[in-house]
Amino acid sequence: MTPPALATVALTCGFGNHTVLHDVSLAVAAHRITALIGPSGCGKSTLLRCFNRMNDHLHGFFHRGQVLVEGRNVYDPTWPVEALRFTVGMVFQKPNPFPLSIRENVLFGPRLAGVTQADALEERVVRSLQQAHLWDEVKDRLHASAFDLSGGQQQRLCIARAMASEPDILLLDEPASALDPIATAKLEETIVALSEAVTVLLVTHNLQQAARVAHRTVFLYLGRVVEEGETVRLFEAPQEKLTEEYVTGRFG
Amino acid sequence: MTGLRHWLKEGAAQRWLAGAALLAALALVVGLVVVVVTVSAGFFWPRPVLELQLRDGSVVLGEEWGREDDPTEAGSQRVRMKVGNRDVFGLDFRWVRGAEVAARRTPAAAWLLERREYGNFYGFPQALRSPTGSVAVTDPSFQVHLDHALAETRRLVQEEEALLRRASRLHEPVARLRLRVAAAERAGRDAAALQAELEAATRREQTAAAPLLAELAELRGRAAAFSLLMRTADGSERELAVSSLLRVVPANRMTTGAKLALYLSRWVEFVSGEPRESNTEGGIFPAIFGTALMVLLMTLVVVPFGVVTALYLNEYAGENAFTNAVRLALANLAGVPSIVFGAFGLAFFVYTVGGGVDRLFFSDTLPTPTFGTGGILWAALTLALLTVPVVVVATEEGLQSVPQAVRDGARALGATRWQTVRRVVLPYATPGILTGTILAVARAAGEVAPLMLTGVVKLAPALAVDTTPPFLHLERKFMHLGFHIYDVGFQSPNIEAAKPSVYATVLVLLGLVVVLNLAAITLRNRLRRRLRSSAV
């Protein structure tokens, strides 16, 4: 049996003497979209950032338990963190394009990975931008600055940039929180299409978004997994009282 | 009472105060520029040649260079006349009291001659002597003959200079051998073989130089055959070699167009020519070149050095006592008087480093120093040291302005710390780095005191860049605009004559700083535009 794309085993972690996640065990199935929901401060983003070890850069981070990507411990000393991040891509809350052209933004990852053949690079630019549903909008101005794009376009450029490294897994940290409704709709469409190629783990604040996009949903509260299941089931027939109160908007 | 309090609270007084301060600052800057521009712009404009008939029967011919109240006689004025003819009168300037003047004329026949030596000559042309005979000024073809004589002698002078350059190149092997003989003798080695070689080289030089010297004598003879007979104001006659003349100006018969052409050609000479007459006349090109090259060398050193320092402080070192101490030291370094940097540069770069280089690589020529004396490299390094705090502080600000989200984005794509710095952080911080460079360049271009100890000279025999290998001569001394102002304005034997040069040099230095700044600011703004984020 193939291991789940992402998994944690009894993961407890936090910063300094503040524990954020308590004994979290979770499995994320491959090629599906899984949403992480929960009120602010419940540890969604921290959990997400465990999978590509971005928490390691923050002051005072500690962890116990295991974080597994495709069955392999992310802290395996023979697995350099840079190589892990080629496998696990990430898109942040706010668009963060680099001060480079659109094309060079997309090629940032491939160049780091040492891809140098011109046609291979070209192929990646086209495919990644197509995957991010951005190709038609930028194909005539690949050499323009990435800052000339609108916010929604910039966020899709960030997706293209992550996809250009050909990851197996894509972590999305509230990717639509800075976008207007039209840009958000376009982005969601993109995310759904992406799940054909990669496993998507999506942190979102927006319950409707989780309901629209995700196959599975995990509800996190105060650093613990309260309930997880198929999205439709979780929203329509929650088994936990806490979940029901949250999805019906009684708190959060 | 309450009205006053209300007025203060509203901030009207503060607003007026702020406005007044801004106006005062503006007035100072604009005033400086206006004074420099108006004074220096006027100096090169051709003035009429005045003839003053004095009551004692003597005549004064020259240009009026200012007037003031006569301190010896209330109610009358005195005129400062530039009478030129230094070789005749000894001084270029004299005061003429208003009461002495019986008549004032601007005789159409009066000429101003600008000469290579002894400054201006004022007088009336009489005749031109050339190999084909003498032509009187009344002859209709006088002007044609004069133009021909000027062109011919100018060509002869150029040939002469080329010959002299060839002759000095012939001497180079002899000079080298002489140094080797001296070194061998000092070391107690047997120098007989070298001595013989030296004698042979000397003979070869003499053989090769003989035809050159003959040609030189012939050229000089041909040039000397052209001379201009001039009558001075007091009626005596002088014969001037045409080859010594730079310009012949019929000052009182010029059209506005001719005046403008002369004015422009004087400016062109000023910025592109060599200085003459201990820097009081001629151009300042070597000083412009020296300033620009020194600033360029300094920039090449200080920018990488400062950027790397700021990178370490901001990206790698943590916030601790050591980095705080480094930052404090940098801030203090920015406040150290520049002459202290000069003294340090002299002791460390010139004597220690330069002396060491000489002992290692130029021991043949010792005790004559090569790098162990002031030079453009040491001056540039000293100024780099002086400006490094500026670059570090500005670069750090630039680095701090790079959004954390962008750094995270690069790390999340699998970039190492260095790759993130190299490919994302540095491009983002470039405007900040350029700001630091601008400030450093502006500071360095105007700095004089440290240079006086580390390599600036009144008159450099050669530019630091020329056609003899290795083309860039970093050990050479150089001329500098700031020092030129000090030297010509305050150390010159003929300060009145040097005044135009001083003001014009100030204008050129200001212009140079403005141009350097504008270039850097344009570059920075262009980069900023590229970096401006249209996103949320």
Image (tube, coloured by chain):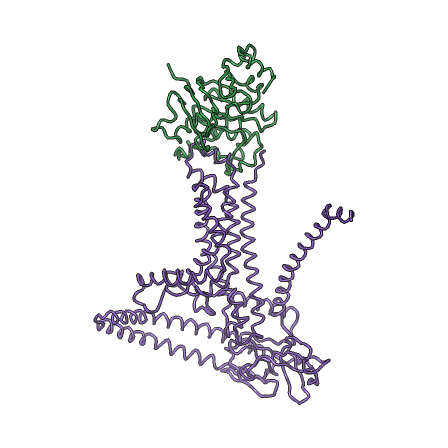
Q: Position of residue A189 (x, y in %)?
A: 55, 22
Q: Position of residue B422 (x, y in %)?
A: 44, 41
Left or right side of A123 for A140: right
- On the question of residue B135 being in view, the answer is no
Q: In which quarter of the image is the C terminus of chain B?
A: top right
Q: Does B271 sit above or below residue B83? A: above
In front: A88, or B72? B72
Looking at the image, which residue is at 56% across and 34% down? A149
Q: Position of residue B432 (x, y in %)?
A: 52, 46
In front: B346, or B283? B346
* Chain coloured green in this rendering: A
* Chain coloured purple in this rendering: B
Looking at the image, which residue is at 69% across and 53% down? B17
Residue placed farthest to the front in the image? Answer: B1
Left or right side of A141 for A83: left
Q: Which quadrant would residue B77 be assigned to in this image?
A: bottom right
Q: Position of residue B156 (x, y in %)?
A: 46, 75
Left or right side of B288 for B536: right
